[in-house]
Image: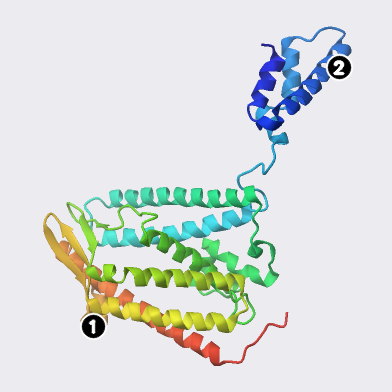
Amino acid sequence: MDLIDRYLNAVAAQLPLDERDDIVAELRDLILSRFEAGEDELGRALTDAEKEAILQEIGHPLVVAARYRKGPDALVGPELFPYWLFGVKAGLLVLLAVHAIGLFINLIGGPADAGRAIAQAFHSFFGAGLTLIGAATLAAAIFEHYGIRPTWLTKWRVKDLGAFGLSDPAAWGASVAATDKAKQTWMPRPRKGWPGGEYLFSFLATGVFVLWWVGAIHFPGLFHVGLRGEDAVATGAPIWTTLYGAILFYAVAQMAVDLASLVRPYAVRMRAAAQAVLAGIGLWLTWTIFEAGHWFTLTRDGETARIAGDWVLLDFDRLRAIGDGGRDLVGVASTLSLVMSWAIAIVAISLMFNAVANLWRLVQPERRSAT
């Protein structure tokens, strides 16, 4: 088999069967004409090295075959790549926050090897991050292959762009520092910015939670609390089984409202009504969880301790003494009980403000931006 046949066979293997013969014949004519031109110029037959050089000029078989292949030439084309990159960055920030919280809870127990706990958290984040990137790439490849372009990718306004600073960690830090420049950069003002922009990150974060809640993704080590010696395992109390469906409904409904806010960003009253209802449902869930009293059980080597709380724990003196708890199983459970009690209380207060703010929007006359 000569060089031409080897080259054409390599190209043909990458081509669809129904077009293979015609394309190979066209390439053969091109190659032979290039060889003849070279021979006429040199006045002699070409050596194998000279033929190889001409074939290399024509291009690698994979590249040449791609010129004839129908459809996109990339998994994520240049048009979709900026959106893919934003989604990946925002998703990784959500995963980073989740793993940071898990690591904090793990380190409360004072593990014998804190370095090992940190390494495990990094390994878990790395694996979850690769899964996220793979899922985003698969979605983008489907969009690219079938030419799918949702309206929110093609129809946009300059005022809508403030929300995309959510994927910039530097903007997050500046915002926490409450600098005016940071607020102007990525925090949309209530009446002049894009009403739906603030819900983009909420949609991504809630989506990750839903996938975790239904078991589609896992965070290894999330329910392992490091203690001095053998790790303790946290198991959910019956309240989570009882409220499983209600919590799933609440999260999916929140995603639906966030998505509607992206598609119809100026439906202010509709969004306010939906958010007020969701805040009410969230308050009911929060109250039910808090009143259950028992949230998790820590188990280590046959010994158990409850992570539970009540109104007594919502005391500032107890909160100031949070670092004074013991490092045994009971002490760690007590510390986590205090943390969870305050976390639930803060969520409840936030939901109440959310409900009041959205009810206030409903009774206010609707205003539109002049631009």
Q: Earlier in the sequence, mark 1 or mark 2?
A: 2
Disc 1: which residue: 311
* Residue at (69% x, 11% y) in the render: 2
* Residue at (55% x, 58% y) in the render: 87
* Towards the viewer: 97 or 172: 97
Residue 249 in percent (x, y) is at 40, 71
Disc 2: which residue: 37
The amino acid pointed to by label 2 is Ala
Q: Is residue 113 above or below residue 35?
A: below
Relative horizontal placement of residue 232, taking residue 359 as reference (left or right): left
Image depth: mark 1 or mark 2 in front:
2
Relative horizontal placement of residue 174, taking residue 122 as reference (left or right): right
Q: Is residue 368 above or below residue 135?
A: below
* Towards the viewer: 185 or 188: 188
Classed neighbour count for the residue bearing mark 2: other residues with Cα under 10 Å, few (<14), some (14–19), many (≥20): few
Residue 88 in percent (x, y) is at 53, 55
* Towards the viewer: 183 or 45: 45
On the question of residue 325 being in view, the answer is no
Furthest residue toward top: 44
Relative horizontal placement of residue 343, taking residue 94 as reference (left or right): left
Q: Secondary structure at mark 2?
A: helix
Residue 7 in percent (x, y) is at 68, 20
Residue 23 in percent (x, y) is at 74, 28
On the question of residue 349 being in view, the answer is yes
